[in-house]
Amino acid sequence: MEPKNTLPSETCSEYEALLEDYLAGDLAGPQANRVAEHLKSCAGCRDAFDSAAASTRFLRRSAPLLERAADPGPGFVRLVMAQIRAQREHQNIGQPVAAFAWRFAMSASLALALLIAYASQQGGQTNSDLAQLRSGDLFPDPATPATQGDVLRMVADTNHGK
Amino acid sequence: MPDVPKNVAASASAISLPLSRRGRADEERELVRMAQSGAESAFEELVRRHQHRVFGLVNSILRRREDVEDVAQQVFLKAFVSIKRFDLRAAFSTWLYKITVNECWDYLRKKKVRPLTYESDMSDEQVSRLDGIVSADRPPEQADDRAEVKEMLEWMLERLPEQDRELLVLKEIEGFSVQELSEILGLNVNTVKVRLFRARAKLMDTYRRRVAASGHSTGQSGG
């Protein structure tokens, strides 16, 4: 005969947590009575409760038969502590190297920043020099007289004023 | 580097006098405090105290005996690295078991494996023979029967959804309380109770269906 479907979806959701307590014997007084009354009147909860109770009995009887984890033994503690010490030592060795690497990186960055600043300053100066080279002070345009005297002088030079 | 005071170390040893639960908790808190300040010997004592439970927990979740020690080592290494961040108001054991559960799931994720599965099905003959044994009030005495009941239990647990199986195993086999499970798994206490109840009901339902499929009626009776 096919057994009734005792899937817990048939239980009343408000009672599920209480049913676990009831099963564990953690309920007393009015709450226990309330659950007992509900179990009498609700077939879904009653079936689920019967299944849960049967499972619990079976589990408690048969759980000792399950394979347990191997005993860690005193060797395990030694192994863990050796790994912790190794990790610490590794950190202790690594720390000065890391500190040196950081210092080196910082110094290199600083030097690079100074170099860039210097180069940009020098670059600015060169540009302004070039600007000066392009200006009329260094290479005055002979075709452009600066003063009235220059004009007269130019005119005299070209003999146009004769 | 600070060392464990003699009174703590002595009382912490396996041959210590029975301590009250509160006394033990205080003593453990002291060990944790010392481990936080860098005392390796205090941490060593904590490993000694919790190694069995961590091993059991890892074994229950992974069901791979060959990997239990590796994962348990990782658990304690992680605990050592992060012990300074541990809040002394909480229970060290719960914190440690939470690390254990997370480490197991990380391990399974990294290895891309499911916990070991028991693929073999049972014969109808086996099921009919087991029906009486499962329904009995006492554990089987015969070695053959014990082996078959164990096989049946593994078969039943295997057919539960992973979360249900884990919860049931931690509660009924590893002996964690509902409160502990709630803290370890980060679930509300009522959620743990509801899930546990459903997992129990599903377990027996699986069994009854198997028995029904073999053409036998179960000997199980109500509550």
Image: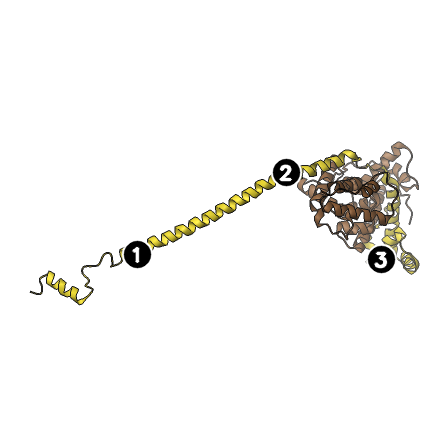
Instruction: Judge by depth and name the residue closer to the eye, A1 or A32.
Output: A32
Residue at disc 3, secondary structure:
helix
Instruction: Judge by depth and name the residue closer to the eye, B185 or B23.
Output: B23
Q: Which residue is mark 2?
A: A90
Cα–Cα span, label 3 and label 2: 56 Å
> Who's brown, chain-wise?
B
Look at the numbered discs 3 and 2 and tell me whether their residues touch, using CB distance below 8 Å: no
Cα–Cα span, label 3 and label 1: 91 Å
The answer for which chain carries disc 1 is A
The answer for which chain carries disc 2 is A
Question: Can you give x and y, in whole percent of width and height, for residue A142 in the image?
Answer: 18, 59
Residue at disc 1, secondary structure:
helix
Instruction: Judge by depth and name the residue closer to the eye, B86 or A38.
Output: B86
Q: Amino acid at mark 1?
A: Ala
Residue at disc 2, secondary structure:
helix
Up/down of A77 relative to A24, above or below: above
Residue A15: assigned label: 3
Which label sits in the foreground, 3 or 1? 1
* Residue ranking furthest to the left: A162
Residue A131: assigned label: 1
Tell me the quarter of the picture where residue B175 sits: top right
Up/down of A118 relative to A77, above or below: below
Q: Are marks 3 and 2 on the same chain?
A: yes
| Residue B161 visible in this rendered orientation of the protein | no
